[in-house]
Image (cartoon, rainbow, N blue to C red):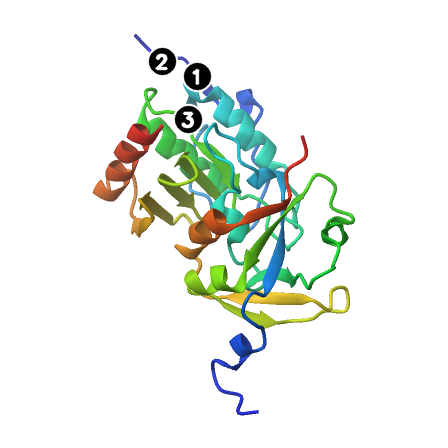
Amino acid sequence: MSGGGTEPQRRYAAGTVVWRRIPPWHFPKKQGQTRPNSPAFDDDPDGPMSVSIAPPGRDPAELLVGHDGFALVELSIEDLQAAGQTLVPAPTAEDPHHAEVIGDKAKAKRTLAKAARWVVPPPG
Amino acid sequence: MSVPTETLSSLGYHARSWPDTGTSETGPLRVPGHLAAVAAEFSQLSALAAGWNSYGAAPVRPSAIEAAVRVLVYAGEDMPLPSISPTPHGGIQLEWGGDDDGVEIEFEPDGSISVLVDVNGELDQRRVTGTDDPSLADALNWAAKLA
């Protein structure tokens, strides 16, 4: 393995899908808006934006355990790349599918919000 | 005709004590009556605990709320009310528009403000220095047209 700068991107195949939880405060609120608000796709204070890889057959409800009232969206690796982002594996003890989305979010967070598709839509 | 005003605290918003914010506010921030609904939302957001997005988000800082209120007061009572969102870094985002075209104004806890205008998918993002920055006025004018 060369360990080159683009290596992490190669860890995931074309068509890879990731999930991200959406808190109620980022649900669409205004008439004419159906997508989450863009701050839902910003980096976190302690690191890059977290996602979880969604392999075929994985139950999306798994990510919402303990997060009542939250929704879930999906993005493809192509969506991430189109927004100038790199998907990097970052497994944790709690989530072996955990990954990080690395890149400047100044504009990308809106691009990602527009590309996101509801997997578990907001309740009600 | 004078615009009725309230203070943030009278509308339910009570700034918490933050030892490291260094806020420069020297008196109660006056909120025009047409922003009462907005102030109520800010009050709710100010109560969010750390980790509110499940990914370690910071609590919303009073400095960000105050900066957002000041811009909304500057925008005037004819300005359509925005959609309001907390940001993971403790800031506030105001948004006008729908799924596609839109205007976002983001207030960071450190006092910095940025605007992002989306026209047909073309994104223009820039920092603004305050209410006297022409880029802010341009963004607000565009937002008013979108609403």
Mark 1 highlights which residue? B33
Q: Chain of mark 2?
A: B
Q: Chain of mark 1?
A: B
Q: Quadrant of residue B120?
A: top left
Mark 3 highlights which residue? B81
Q: Chain of mark 3?
A: B
Q: Position of residue B134 (x, y in %)?
A: 21, 41
Mark 2 highlights which residue? B3
Position of residue B122 relative to residue A56, above or below, is: above
Q: In the visual, does B76 lie left or right of B57?
A: left
Give the CA separation, mark 2 to mark 1: 7 Å
- Is circle 2 on the same chain as circle 1? yes
Indicate which disc residue A86 carries: none
Q: Position of residue B83 (x, y in %)?
A: 47, 33
Sequence-wise, which precedes: disc 3 or disc 2? 2
Amino acid at circle 3: Leu
Give the CA separation, mark 3 to mark 1: 12 Å
Q: Are marks 3 and 2 in contact (CB under 8 Å)?
A: no
Q: Are marks 2 and 1 in contact (CB under 8 Å)?
A: yes
Amino acid at circle 2: Val
Q: Are marks 3 and 1 in contact (CB under 8 Å)?
A: no
Q: Position of residue B13 (x, y in %)?
A: 56, 28
Look at discs 3 and 2 and give the one toward the viewer: 3
Sequence-wise, which precedes: disc 3 or disc 1? 1
Of residue B15 and residue A39, the one placed in the foreground of this image is A39
Q: Secondary structure at mark 1?
A: helix
Of residue B9 and residue B82, the one placed in the foreground of this image is B82
Sequence-wise, which precedes: disc 2 or disc 1? 2
Give the CA separation, mark 3 to mark 2: 16 Å
